[in-house]
Every structure is written in C-alpha cells, then in structure tokens.
C-alpha cells in the first residue's frame, strides 16, 4: 500500500480564476514549499478543480508515487470532496488528502495587502504539509439506510415531493400539521399562467399521492423530536385525534354552535369548531379545531357528547427528511397602509377568498357598498427599507422581493376586470416583476384593460387614510407618482388591496430539531444556491418549496421534484457513507476515568465497557461511530490523551501549529 | 460504433443537462449525454462570476463537468448532432451524427503539442471571437474532454500537427459517422442564444464599434478572458464610462419578443459590480424599465449595487449612434422626468435577452414564444407534449442558473419515474438498480 510508505507529498495551489492569485503570489508560494521535507512536487494551476487540474493530481499520484496530497484552494466546503474523489480515482485512500482554504481564509480577506496574503498563504500551506505527513488512511463509516423518507408538510410542495419519492420506488410518510391536505394552494381559485382551477390541479395531485401504495399519510400530526443521521433518522411524531368520525360527524356538526374566525378565509367569515375548510377537501371527514374548541359538550338528540383530543405518539424510522413547511402571507401590523384600522383595507389573499365567496353579483361588494375604485399596492411586507418600515422581531426589515406578488396582483386585476369591467383599478408599484413564462402577458393585458399604473419610490411609500367627511369615497390614497414625474396624486377609492409578500414560518422548533439553519432573510437555508440548491447543511435533510424562500406553484413543484431526486440518489441503494472524522480510543492509553463519557453531549456516542485484561476487570471507553459527530469534547478532557478525532489528531494539530509559527528560509525572499 | 441502450438520453451538456445526467446517474441509471460542441460546459463555463454569490464561475462549473466525465453511469458523446428521434415502444431510437474531430480521442492526451505547432490563428467563439486560438486546439483550458479538435474550415492541411503529435492521434481521414442510441427517455437541455439585435436598427444593428453583447463583457471580466482586462473592442482603450441598456431584445414588440428574459437585470448588476472592481474609476449607468431582481438574495444584491454607486436610471433608450471617435451616444427618454437626453459613453452593453437555441431535430410542440411547450406548468413543469421527453433549463424559457439547476433535478425525477413505469430494460436489471 502506498500509504504505508514514506510520505511523498504533492502540493497544489489553485489560482481560483484570479480569486486567489489576485492577492497571493501562488508561484512564489509553490517554489518556497518545494524545499520542505517530504514534498515531492509543487504545482500551481488556473483552476485545480477543473478536470484538467484534477488529472494533474491523478497523474502525479500514478507517475511520481505521490501518496499524500495537499491542495490550497477555496473553502473545503466547496471542493474538498472533489479532490478526495480525484485522489480516490488515482488509487489513493481519500483521507490522505488535506484541503487548505486559501480563498476564504486568505485572499478574500487580505486582498488589500498582497505581501501579507502571500506570507499567510505560505504559512497555511506549510501547516497543511505538516499535517499531511501524519495523515493515515481511513475508511468511511458505512451504514444501512432506511429506504423510507419523511415529508413534512402537505401543501403542494410536500405532496409533489412525496409523489415523486414514491415513484422512485421508495417508501414515503407524509405528515401534515392541519387535519387536511392542500396547504395554501387550496385557498386559491385559479392559477397563473394557465388559468386552471387551483383545486382541480391540487386534488388531482392529492388523488395520485393518496392512491400510491408507497405513501402513508398522517394528518393533524407534528414532529416532536428528531435523532439520528442520514439513512437512520428516528422521528417522534404526535398525531392529534380527528375528534369525529364519518358516522357521527354530521350530527355533531349540526349540534356544534361554537364559531371562530375561519383562517381558511383569512378571518373574513366564521366557521364552527368542527369543520371542513371547504367542500371537497381531503380528507372529507371533518375535524375538531382543538386550539379553539371550548370543551363544552355537544347536545346530540339529548345526549351530551364531549370531545377529547387523545393524541397518539409514535416513532418513524426514515433515511431522509424533506422539509416542505411552506410560508405565511405577510400580515401587516396595525396601521400599515390603514390595515386593521380601515375596514376598506384588505390583503390580496383576503380578496381572493372574498371573490371566491361572492361568485355572483354584478358589482364588487365590500363592507356593504359597491366598489367602483380600487387601489392595489405592491411590495407590502417585501423590499422593505431600513428606517421606513417597521422591523420584524429580530430587528430586521423584509428586504427581500417576494417574487410572486407582481404576477399574482396582475392575475387579480385581470380577474377583477373580467368580472367587473366598470371597476377602476389603480396599481401602485415600484417595479413590475412579471418575469415568468406567460407572466408578462398579464402586464400587457392590464395595460389594455385600462388598469392605471402609478410608480412609487421605495423610500416614499403611498399613504392610505380615511377620506374627509362627505367625500364620495371612504378612503384616500396619496402617492408620489414617478410616471408623472413625481406628481403628488390623490386617489379616492372604495377598497385598498395590499399585495402582501411571503413570510418565513415559525416552525415551533422543527428547524432546531433538524439542526438546519436560516438565512439572513429568515427562510430556510440551502447549502449553496448553485451547487446544492435544495439540500441543507445537514446531510439527508432536504428542502422543498416556499419554506426556502418565495416561490410560485410551478417553482415549488420543480423544487419538490428536485428534492425527490436527491432523496432517491441518497437512499436508493439502501446504504449511506458517513465521514470517518469521529473519536477513536487508544486502548493502550485509556484507563477508564470516564471523563470522556461525562463530557459527551451526544446520545450513545461514547460509553465505558468492562473488559477482561489479564484476568482483571477494567473499564475502557468505547465509541459508537454512527452516533459520534467528532466534536472533540472527549479529546479535551481525557487526562491520558487516549482519545483522538480521526483525521484531526492532537499530533496533527501540534504539527500544524508548529509549522504556522515557523519562518521558512524562503519566506523572506518570497514576501520581500 | 455500437448500437447502445440507455435509460435516458440528455441532449445538451450545459449546466442543466449536466445536472440532469448527474442526478440520473447517481440513481444508477445509464445516461447518454450528447453535446453539440467539442466540450461540455455550455454557456455557463464562459461566464465570469455568478450572481448573487459572486462565486467564480469555473469553480462551480468545472467540478460538475469533471463529475460528469468520471461518472461510471454517464456516457459522454461530444461533438455530436441529433439527427432524428423515433418512438420505439415506450422509448426512442435516437440517431446521432458524430462530427469528425480529425483527432482520435482514444489516443489524444490533451498535451496541446498540435496546438502549439499549428500556424493558423482563428477567432475563438469561446471568447465571443474577441480572442483567438489555433485551427487545431483543445477548445479551452478546462474543456471536458481534454481532447483536441481540428477546424476544417481554417485548416491548411499542412500536416505539422500530425508530425508533432507524440501519440499519432491526428487522423485527417475521419468521416462523419452515424450511430443509434436506444433510450427509454429523453431530456431536452438545449439551452439558449442571445436575442438577435441585428434587426434592431435603433441600436446600431450590431454594427457600432463599442456596443457589445453581455457575453462579451463576461469574457472581458473572466480571469481566463482574452485580454485579462476590460477594453473597448473598437480601439483597445480602457473605458471610463459604461452604460447598460436593459431589455435590449426583451419585452420588445418590435422584435416580436414580448417576454421578460429574467436574467438580464441580475447579470447587468453583477457585471456593474465586477466592473466597479476592475475599473474603480469608471462610471457605470444602467438604463432600465423595471428592475426585476426577484430571486433569493437578488433584491439585496441590487440594493448593494446601488450603495456601491452604480447609477440606476429609469429610462427607455430610444436609439444609439456613435461619434467620430466611435463613442456610443445614447438617446434616452427619462421616464422619471419626461426629458429626452443624449449621453455619450465609452462602452455600451446591450442587455440582450434569451431566445431558444436552434433546436436539434427533435419534433416537439413549441410555445408561442418559441421555447419548448410545457402544457401543464402548474402540475408538471418539466413534461413536454411528447410522452417520455422532458425539458429542463432555458430550453423551456428564460431561466437563471439556480432555477436551471433545480429544474434539471426535477426533470431527472420525472425521467426516472417514467423509466421505472415504462422503461424497457429487463425487470431484473431494474431490481438491480437498487440492489
């Protein structure tokens, strides 16, 4: 085996297309490293990660007998795996490779001082070489994987992900927090750009999902706990009772008198606490709204019947988790554009529900009167500006674009114009972002339909106030319109529609349980928007749909199918590999103090076991690699230095620290 | 060549096609990836940096190219054209033309000795013809495969390359060859071209010296670019003022292209930011109708560009002409003030949009916009009007790289489900997929 021979180290420095070579004199660094013990060859390349660059390394391994490889390039997160792959192809153990992050740790942060950047590069690289001398071959931890995925969320993204995973021949369990499937899409009437019925599309999808033999569905269920790792997650689930059955539902529903604002209609109507959100919903069996049910018994034919939520708890063993938890429409705070103060101010989702509920009629009715003039304000809760808008709980404003609202707004104006051709519509926007295929047509139709467009600057938002007494309209909208060169325009209207954006959801700890993070915009964060756009930093936890950021239905479907493709790649073979960077005990040095066991915060990762040593019972620490994350807490507390994290041993660290501090003879010449 | 049977055939080796092939290959399917050019990488490999992360483009693209090249389940066919696609059961017989490289790729090592020896210099389309390479060459430094290709249009057949080649890979006798791949499913990843402006007389019809297209600017800004710096193509002068004309060829009824091309706002802003670094003293102005920075992190990117001093002006550029020194002069209708102003710049970039690339011979229903039709975008965004054929990336309409990559994985999911449900490979083999 080449790895057991004397180290012959190949050192490669990547220009990273100018990213590194712009600050670091790569050739000089390579030259200086050449003199280090065990360094057989040093090279630089425009782009080491390219196929040509990787071939260079492979060739050196095969032709020069290189048996340790160090590459100075971008952050290891980006391309460490790429180079481990190259090393493996050339027949070397992948863990005889060390990656130095010259770009993130050096050239990007020290671009202003090229001498210092070059000096630092040399030190980081020589530390890498020092570590490489001590690298030992390692084997990844190979484990069986459950060919079973969990999808969290029963909206359009979750349903699509579940269907596509099932179609790949894997088992899927879908859990949905509410007692009904469909999510936000069920609240829509038609979808753009095809003008198909949202619910017809949705129910076609639900039908396919529920009919698929690989799919199990739990409604009214939520995740209470997560443990394990890719291939072998254990998920604690709690499922609430439905409260009624098909046999007693109708009787109980007619006996039920307690009513609450209906969230399905965004509070425009009331519904009973035993309910179906809409006709034709799935499941068709009604459910009890336990959050609001006051607990009083129902009188059914003289019999008092009290309903109780008796939640069931159970565990699921799954190999991967798809998070399709969706979004909430932005709810303006009291007073933003008159919301919550003036009854004539509604959000776009509310208006969609209002129109769905008032199918008939020659004119649009609102708050007891006919509407003749409507103002539609874009970017409510989106593209917010610091100092102008009220910040969210974390002190930040929603500075992102919600992507969907422009087309959704003009989709609405088209619908309004079709139903009520007499209506005057004013559209107050910053930019019209009808970017998608077939979306620009809505903009063109709106212009043809006579929608009046006014353009405001983000810092000077329109004002909405009650109209003066005796005015013909109840509300006055004032806007500084840039299309008329900054003229202050007053528009008396009967209704103001706020095109509210997407809000990231409070997941009640689910993100913490899954150990996934959120971006600055508070939406769930992908690893890399281009390299791995639907995966999270936690292997086996994958995103689908608007939990990740604003998306329309088409985009959510694509993201969900992409998530399914990732799940299929991950679990299809029924086994997964985990990196070997876990604790390892040197039994010669261990004398069973147990300090490591106390320091460990991961369940089942390290334990003391009794061994028979020369007829004597002794305790020794034993690692369960699958449960160890390689955090090193045990390493720090061991009085005998008996524990090390494989691939990152104390000896390797010491060698690196020493090398970083040492001035190489060539250094003065290089950095002079 | 042999007749071959694949689970899927992906047409187009750009970022979308590569991602679809990787996702299918990772699941154990046998995939043929067919590319028209001598190297995979598509448009993306020619770009400088990508928005909104400003990662260097080759850092994202080349590893994917490499992964494709080394994937045990992906079979790469470069420099090939699709000739016909015929239904065969639930799958297809795809007839493919292998164009002659005049280089035996089983022998060529990519050492480039032929290239160093070749006396003929020809414009390099990889550099948007701003740079040059030889009549025989490895297409570009990070090309996959790293194999030479000879351009018969320019070659003098002097034979120097043949004499120099250490492995006797040069083969002047190569002829076009046709072979057939039987595939259970097809993914169209045929990409885009820039909207043509040759008919846009108001903007100089492509004849003005210092009015360039955005892909040229990408090459100027790329570290591997032809000059390693930003220069006016007209006279090699370093530009002190640069203007971007947005929606040049999108949302434009006069050209019959009424749709939004989705990427132009973001690439203009990105290039403006990069120019800010490359030419710190240069003034950069972006003339626009609407700024459409709708993607994740894009609006914040736009605001950063504003804060960096990029000048955003809402105005419709009515026409462009040039003065005696070949400086482009823009005539702009300023939407915010109503004035019509004339402004002279050193360099103008037309933010051209996206039109479908010329299609290979695969008969598919197209939308009114010319892109491959997707009959049910809100239930099956990658499914075309022909069963078993799926579409991804810009073949289905303008899309940025992030959306293309997601769409590529989605197309792979659709194709793999189709293969499982309809594929003709033996049941035993299908079982073995997941063994």
Image (cartoon, rainbow, N blue to C red):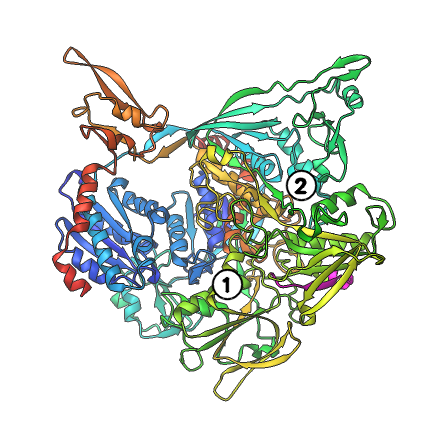
Front-most of residues B308 and A462 = A462
Position of residue A235 relative to residue A133, above or below, is: above
Specify the segment rendered in magenta: A446-458
- Residue at the (51%, 54%) spot, across then down: B297
Q: Residue furthest bottom?
A: B324
Front-most of residues A54 and A608 = A608
Number of numbered discs overlaid on the protein picture: 2
Q: Position of residue B137 (x, y in %)?
A: 34, 66
Q: Chain of mark 1?
A: B
* Label 2 neighbour load within 10 Å: few <14, some 14-19, many 20+: some
Q: Which mark is residue B267?
A: 1
> Is residue A513 shown left or right of residue B89?
left
Q: Chain of mark 2?
A: A
* Label 1 neighbour load within 10 Å: few <14, some 14-19, many 20+: many
Query: Mark 2 falls on what kind of element?
Result: helix
- Asked whether residue A402 appears in the rendered view, the answer is yes
Position of residue B46 relative to residue A250, above or below, is: below
Position of residue A625 relative to residue A131, above or below, is: above
How far, Cα to Cα, is label 2 from label 1?
32 Å
Q: Residue furthest right?
A: A362
Q: Residue furthest top?
A: A615
Is A311 colored magenta in this rendering? no
Q: Which mark is residue A185?
A: 2
Q: Position of residue B12 (x, y in %)?
A: 49, 55
> Is residue A68 shown left or right of residue A453?
left
């Amino acid at each position: 085996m080449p790895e057991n021979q004397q180290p012959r180290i190949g050192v490669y420095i990547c220009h990273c297309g100018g990213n590194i070579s712009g600050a670091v004199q790569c050739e000089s660094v390579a030259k200086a490293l050449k003199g280090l013990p065990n360094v057989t060859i040093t090279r630089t390349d425009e782009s080491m990660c390219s196929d040509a660059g990787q071939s260079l390394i492979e060739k050196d391994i095969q032709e020069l007998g290189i048996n340790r490889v160090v590459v100075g390039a971008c952050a290891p997160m980006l391309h460490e795996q790429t180079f481990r792959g190259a090393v493996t192809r050339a027949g070397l153990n992948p863990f005889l490779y060390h990656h130095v992050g010259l770009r993130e740790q050096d050239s990007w942060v020290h671009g202003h001082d090229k001498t210092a950047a070059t000096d630092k590069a040399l030190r980081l690289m020589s530390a890498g070489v020092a570590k490489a001398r001590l690298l030992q071959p390692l084997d990844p931890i190979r484990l069986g994987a459950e060919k079973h995925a969990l999808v969290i969320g029963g909206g359009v993204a979750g349903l699509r992900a579940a269907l596509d995973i099932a179609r790949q021949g894997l088992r899927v369990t879908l859990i949905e927090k509410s007692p009904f499937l469909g999510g936000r899409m069920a609240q829509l009437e038609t979808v753009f750009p095809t003008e198909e019925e949202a619910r017809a599309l949705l129910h076609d999808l639900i039908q396919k999902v529920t009919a698929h033999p690989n799919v199990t569905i739990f409604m009214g269920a939520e995740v209470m706990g997560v443990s394990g790792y890719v291939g072998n997650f254990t998920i604690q689930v709690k499922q609430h009772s439905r409260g009624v059955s098909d046999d007693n539902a109708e009787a109980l529903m007619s006996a039920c008198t307690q009513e609450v604002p209906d969230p399905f209609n965004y509070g425009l109507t009331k519904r009973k606490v035993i309910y179906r959100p809409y006709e034709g919903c799935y499941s068709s069996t009604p459910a009890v709204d336990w959050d609001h049910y006051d607990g009083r018994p129902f009188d059914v034919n003289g019999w008092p019947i009290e309903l109780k939520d008796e939640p069931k708890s159970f565990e699921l063993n799954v190999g991967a988790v798809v998070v399709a938890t969706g979004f909430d429409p932005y709810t303006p705070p009291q007073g933003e554009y008159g919301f919550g103060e003036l009854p004539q101010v509604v959000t776009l989702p509310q208006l969609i529900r209002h129109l769905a509920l008032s199918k008939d009629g020659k004119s649009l009715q609102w708050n007891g009167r006919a509407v003749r003039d409507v103002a539609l304000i874009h970017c409510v809760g989106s593209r917010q500006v610091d100092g102008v808008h009220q910040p969210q709980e974390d002190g930040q404003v929603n500075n992102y674009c919600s992507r969907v609202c422009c087309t959704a707004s003009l989709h609405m104006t088209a619908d309004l114009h079709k139903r009520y051709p007499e209506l005057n519509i004013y559209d107050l926007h910053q930019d019209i972002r009808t970017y998608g295929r077939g979306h620009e047509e809505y903009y063109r139709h709106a212009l043809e339909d006579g929608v009046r467009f006014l353009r405001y600057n983000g810092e000077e938002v329109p004002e909405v106030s009650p109209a003066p007494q005796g005015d013909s309209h109840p509300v006055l909208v004032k806007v500084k319109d840039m299309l008329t060169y900054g003229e202050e325009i007053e528009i008396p209207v009967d209704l103001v529609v706020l095109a509210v954006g997407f809000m990231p959801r409070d997941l009640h700890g689910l993100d913490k349980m899954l150990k996934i993070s959120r971006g600055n915009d508070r939406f769930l964060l992908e690893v890399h928007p281009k390299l791995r756009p639907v995966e999270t930093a936690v292997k086996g936890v994958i995103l689908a749909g608007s939990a990740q950021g604003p998306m329309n239905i088409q985009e959510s479907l694509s993201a969900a199918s992409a998530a399914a493709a990732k799940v299929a790649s991950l679990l299809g073979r029924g086994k997964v590999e985990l990196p070997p960077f876990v604790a390892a005990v040197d039994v010669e040095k261990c004398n069973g103090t147990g300090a490591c066991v106390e320091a460990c915060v991961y369940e089942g990762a390290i334990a003391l076991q009794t061994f028979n040593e020369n007829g004597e019972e002794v305790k020794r620490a034993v690692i369960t690699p699958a449960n160890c994350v390689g955090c090193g807490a045990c390493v720090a507390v061991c009085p005998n230095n008996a524990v090390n994290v494989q691939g990152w041993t104390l000896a390797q660290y010491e060698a690196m620290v020493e090398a970083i501090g040492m001035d190489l003879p060539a250094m003065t010449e290089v950095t002079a | 060549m042999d007749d071959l049977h694949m689970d899927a055939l992906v047409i187009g080796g750009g970022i979308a096609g590569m991602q679809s092939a990787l996702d299918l290959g990772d699941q154990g399917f046998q995939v043929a990836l067919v590319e028209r050019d001598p190297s995979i990488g598509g448009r993306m490999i020619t770009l400088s940096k990508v928005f909104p992360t400003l990662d260097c483009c080759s850092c994202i693209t080349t590893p994917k190219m490499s992964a494709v090249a080394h994937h045990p389940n992906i079979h790469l066919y470069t420099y090939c054209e699709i000739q016909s696609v015929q239904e065969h059961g639930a799958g297809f017989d795809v007839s493919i033309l292998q164009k002659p490289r005049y280089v035996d790729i089983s022998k060529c090592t990519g050492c480039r000795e032929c290239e160093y020896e070749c006396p003929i210099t020809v414009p390099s389309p990889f550099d948007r013809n701003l740079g040059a390479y030889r009549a025989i060459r490895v297409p570009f430094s990070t090309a996959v495969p790293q194999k030479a290709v000879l351009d018969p249009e320019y070659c003098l057949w002097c034979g120097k390359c043949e004499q120099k080649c250490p492995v006797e890979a040069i083969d002047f006798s190569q002829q076009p060859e046709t072979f057939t791949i039987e595939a259970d499913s097809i993914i169209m990843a045929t990409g885009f071209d820039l909207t043509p402006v040759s008919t846009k007389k108001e903007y100089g019809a492509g004849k003005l010296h210092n009015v360039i297209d955005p892909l040229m600017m990408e090459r100027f800004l790329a570290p591997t670019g032809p000059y390693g710096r930003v220069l006016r193509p007209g006279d090699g002068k370093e530009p002190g003022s640069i203007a971007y004309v947005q929606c040049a060829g999108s949302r434009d009824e006069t050209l019959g292209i009424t749709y939004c091309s989705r990427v132009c706002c973001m690439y203009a802003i990105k290039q403006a930011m990069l120019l800010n670094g490359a030419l710190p003293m240069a003034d950069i102005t972006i003339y626009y109708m609407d700024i459409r920075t709708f993607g994740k992190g894009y609006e914040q990117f736009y605001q950063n560009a504003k804060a960096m001093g990029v000048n955003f002006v809402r105005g419709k550029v009515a026409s462009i002409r040039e003065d005696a020194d070949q400086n482009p002069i823009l005539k702009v209708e300023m939407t915010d003030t109503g004035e019509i102003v004339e402004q002279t710049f050193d360099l103008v970039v037309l933010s051209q949009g996206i039109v479908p690339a010329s299609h290979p011979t695969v008969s598919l229903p197209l939308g009114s916009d010319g892109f491959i039709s997707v009959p049910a975008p809100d239930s099956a965004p990658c499914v075309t009007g022909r069963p078993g054929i799926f579409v991804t990336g810009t073949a289905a309409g303008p899309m940025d790289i992030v959306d293309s990559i997601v769409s590529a994985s989605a197309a792979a999911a659709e194709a793999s489900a189709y293969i499982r449900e309809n594929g003709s490979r033996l049941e035993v083999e299908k079982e073995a997929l997941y063994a």
